[in-house]
Image (cartoon, grey):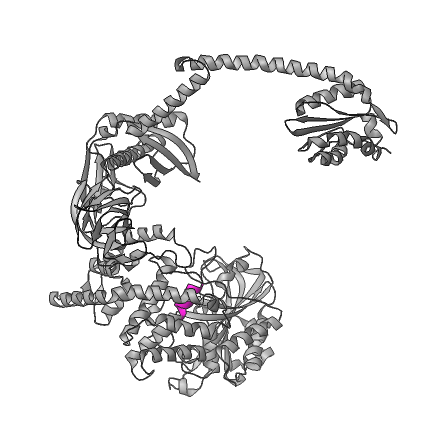
Amino acid sequence: MKAYGVNELRKMYLDFFESKGHLKMNSFSLVPQNDKSLLLINSGMAPLKPYFTGQEIPPRKRITTCQKCIRTGDIENVGKTARHGTFFEMLGNFSFGDYFKTEAIHWSWEFLTDVVGLEANCLYPSVYLDDDEAFDIWNKEIGIPAENIFRFGKADNFWEHGAGPCGPCSEIYYDRGEKYGCGKPDCTVGCDCDRYIEVWNNVFTQFEGDGNGNYAELSNKNIDTGMGLERLATVVQDVDSIFDVDTIKALRDKVCEVAGVTYKMDAKVDVSIRLITDHIRSVTFMISDGIIPSNEGRGYVLRRLLRRAARHGRLLGIKDRFLATLSTTVIKESKDGYPELEEKKDYILKLLTIEEDNFNKTIDQGLTILTELEDTMVKEGTKTLSGEDAFKLYDTYGFPLDLTKEILEEKGFEVDEEGFQKAMKVQRETARSARAVTNYMGADETVYQQLDPSLTSVFVGYNNVTHSSKIIALTTETEVTEELIAGQSGTIFTEETPFYATSGGQAADTGIISTADAEFEVEDTIKLQGGKIGHVGKVTKGLFKLSDKVDLTIDVNRRLATGKNHSATHLLQKALRLVLGSHVEQAGSLVTNERLRFDFTHFSALTKEEIQRVEEIVNNEIAEALPVHTDIMTIEEAKKTGAMALFGEKYGDKVRVVSMGDFSRELCGGTHVSNTGNILVFKIVSETGVAAGVRRIEALTAHGVFSYYSELEKELNIAAKTAKTEPANLTKRIEALQEEIKILSSENEKLKNKLAKETLGDVMNQVTEVKGVKLLAAKVPDVDMNGLRNLGDQLKDKLGEGVVILASAMEDKVNLIAMATDDAMAKGAHAGNLIKELAVLVGGGGGGRPNMAQAGGKNPAGIDTVVEKAPKALENQIK
């Protein structure tokens, strides 16, 4: 048997099944398409599910692929064993209602024995316990002795996942010899040792299961074959594990070269070597498919794998960046099968370098903190790290939970995961918001990733509009700096700030940061990971340096106006629930100093009466001058008070509950008025639908309402002036003008009719005869389409029998009609076809029925040609 390489085996398999009439398809992306059940593609058949379920028609009934896959279910064991890996390639041949057991079994045997050259006497098939059909194919057709065919039960040889298509399996095992065995006298197929290794799995999808053990035969039976490429290579190359096959060994050797270590010299070192080897394969392929590091979903899987590899590199003594170097080897070894790796090489290496740099900036600090926490736990006699401390390591020092767990487990400690998850809620919401604006090719990487993760800011603006604090960080738009000078744009971070950063639907504060000699105009305030609050803007004079003591002053009028709109939003939500029902829930909001926008669940447009009632309720509560109180309590206590949670907010153990008298009580981190009377007045200016079951109200308060009515008054005065009256008399004046318009319109119609009658006498002398059919083709001035039709009817009546064609130019446009009487139609005349032929002469088009047709045109100069060509066009129609 020849020791074929991984790339050779891949090609051999795909070529073989192509020769059997299969369509060879490229691997699908690791990112599932229209499949919310999967985070990442984890099997060869996963991307083909729509073909198996019948949701989509396959491009061919026979398909073969080599699919890249990621599985992270056993990630904790990766490196610790030579079996486990997160990335693998799955060879597959699939039949959608075409061939079935006979062909599948014969071809699997043919490929393994004739093509690859595995010894037939070392191959042992298995079948499902009751699958006599498969047993007979192996026994009677392939010629495998009955004692070499193994029957296994449902747990091993029946594929199903709940209700849906399912069926028995037939696996093929290869006996690798006693050197891989456990030495037990009863060692055989099914033993947990490495002697008998499964290399092929034929899944015969022949039933529809109801999930309760009942099965119906499928009319269209399918074949789903899966065979791990790396596992097949392990057998063919007669090596110990997947880490020893040619392409992976090349990467493993590169890891050893970079780290300056030797494989199989130290068990602990081997764990790190295998883990890095596996993980760098996964992250290289994931990045090539457009996945970028993040704190949610598949982006989190990528970051987790990447950081585990980076940390184990440190354990091996690698001091410099190394992930991109290893990725180059992955690309080199796998680009034959996956050319996208080479195409995206620069991007892959760049993203890996950025992420590794970011991690390296934080890992030393994090490890130092973790060591201190370990010492504290030892002194306190506890073996559990608190969830709060674990989250601090994650949020401030970039340590994922699994990394903290892995480090601590090596030393006999554990983590309070439940506490960690509670602390993660706010961070997850931030990550979702960030993901909405993430762009491919790493466009979401910003200067703020360069900041020291340990930096944090404290918001002190609930009760202060001015505050003094120290600058803890400065950035330009592209880099962290130690100073900003006049004319430069950038971001200032301080220990404490009265500036509210955009969050919870409330827009940010603006204002001024100053010293005795310098001034910075704050145009936006942003909340960043780790509790950092950034003041974004421009230095208008002077110089700001790191550690400067500065005065921070918000735009008070903007803050007060924003607070009025925010408090009104709380009143609005309660009013909507009172008027529409308790099904109303917030689905989004935006609160600025100019207006408020509130999205809520409701299933129909609000009536004028409902809108009016909501406005009345809100304005009544404003008039009641309800005191606005803020209380800090636990989330459980807040729930007991009946406080409502607002959209987009994630809450920790301690929450702010904002109460407006006994009318409204909500969890909220925003700023508000101290009394509802400060809102002054509330006005809804629009109510629209934004999605199925979601409505949107936009409204104004206080000076926003006054400005709204001021603009309306201005428009009213302009309208009154235009109508030459006073605003108070505008309605009567409009009614009078409408009556005048009605009278003038009537007079205009009379004049048109009179003109049409006068035109009758002018054009009747233009009547000609074409093959015994009278034809009146004429040009008339300034008549619209309605007038032209009326005129045509009158001319047709006066003509008696025949065809009328009229053209008129009006405001640089052409109106064209054709009419034919019954007698003319009987002789072949067709108004629609006449119009179709003649309209092109005036740059237009049209058509219609045999008795009447019309068209428009853009070229009045062609009207004379229409009149000239009309007789010939009619002549061609007459029989």
Q: Which residue is drawn at 42% across and 74% down?
A: 329
The quadrant where residue 664 appears: top left
| Part of the protein shown in magenta | 281-289
The quadrant where residue 553 appears: top left
In the picture, the quarter occupied by the C terminus is: top right
Q: Is residue 120 magenta?
A: no
Front in this rendered view, residue 362 or 821: 362
Residue 127 at x, y percent in the picture: 50, 73
The quadrant where residue 140 appears: bottom right
Query: Image check: 427 left or right of 2?
Result: left
Point out the residue furthest to the left here: 379
Front in this rendered view, residue 572 or 155: 572
Query: Image check: 238 left or right of 312?
Result: right
Point out the residue furthest to the right here: 772
Residue 233, placed above or below residue 453: below
Tell me if I can see residue 583 in this picture. no
Q: Is residue 282 magenta?
A: yes
Q: Which residue is drawn at 44% across and 77% down?
A: 247
Residue 742 at x, y percent in the picture: 56, 14
Residue 563, placed above or below residue 616: below
